[in-house]
Image: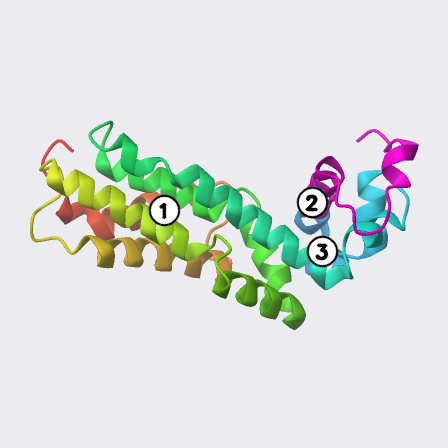
Amino acid sequence: MQPLSLEEQLSPRGVATPNVRERLFEAAEAVLEREGPAGLTNRSVTEEAGCAKGLLYNHFTDLDDFVAQLVLDRFRRVAEEVAPLPGRAGEGAVLENLTEAALALLGSHGAVIAAVALSRRGVTERVEEAWAGGAPGPTAVENALAAYLEEEQRRGRVGSAVDCPMLALAVTGTVHHLLMTGGARPGDDRQLVRRLVGALAGGATAAGS
């Protein structure tokens, strides 16, 4: 990464410049992948980002706040990625669409981000409080999957007897479990999630869907 500009480094406390936040978030993901939760410090993140050591605290209250905002930002991205799914009902195969949504929830760095969140009680509390206040989280993904399945049901591509909200909960909840426990590993997550979705929803779809 290129060093931040002087303007970025000297940005006033409390003013969260979006490109700075994302630069720090990406640096944190790189540190977590390489060193795990124990290696995540203000110093390791700012060195990875190639910026002044005090920059992180110009934009976040403390390290717990930084990690919590990273978790919330990544879940927001997932929710935004999955939100259009109901509008794509009738396109592609139902199981494949569900698999892609589940993989989005798992995320490319999801397991290591979840690991550091669970290792810091302050982070967990802040994230749960934000979700309770309406910040996009697993519930937003679950609702999008339920709406998608119900639309496919209206089209006859999901069986009429299927409880779509419960199926959405089963898929989202199980993938969230994998996320929180590190049950998926880089390289085998797609195969694992495909098997998972097939086991949960394979009997719900019409032949050829």
- Relative to 111, does residue 90 appear above or below in the rendering? above
For image coordinates 34% across by 53% down, the residue present is 142
What is the x, y in percent for residue 104? Answer: 44, 42
Residue 159 among magenta residues: no
The mark found on residue 25 in the picture is: 2
What is the x, y in percent for residue 22? Answer: 69, 40
In the drawing, does residue 149 fall left or right of residue 11? left
Picture quadrant where residue 69 is located: bottom right
The mark found on residue 66 in the picture is: 3
Amino acid type, label 1: Val
The mark found on residue 6 in the picture is: none
The Cα atoms of the two marked residues, 1 and 3, are separated by 29 Å
The numbered mark, 1 or 3, whose residue comes first in the sequence reads 3
Picture quadrant where residue 4 is located: top right
Amino acid type, label 2: Phe
Mark 1–mark 3 CB contact (< 8 Å): no
Q: Which residues are magenta?
A: 1-29
For image coordinates 50% across by 44% down, the residue present is 107
- Dot 1: within a 10 Å radius of its alpha carbon, few (fewer than 14), some, or many (20 or more) residues? many
Disc 2, SS: helix
- Relative to 70, does residue 173 appear above or below in the rendering? below
The Cα atoms of the two marked residues, 1 and 2, are separated by 26 Å
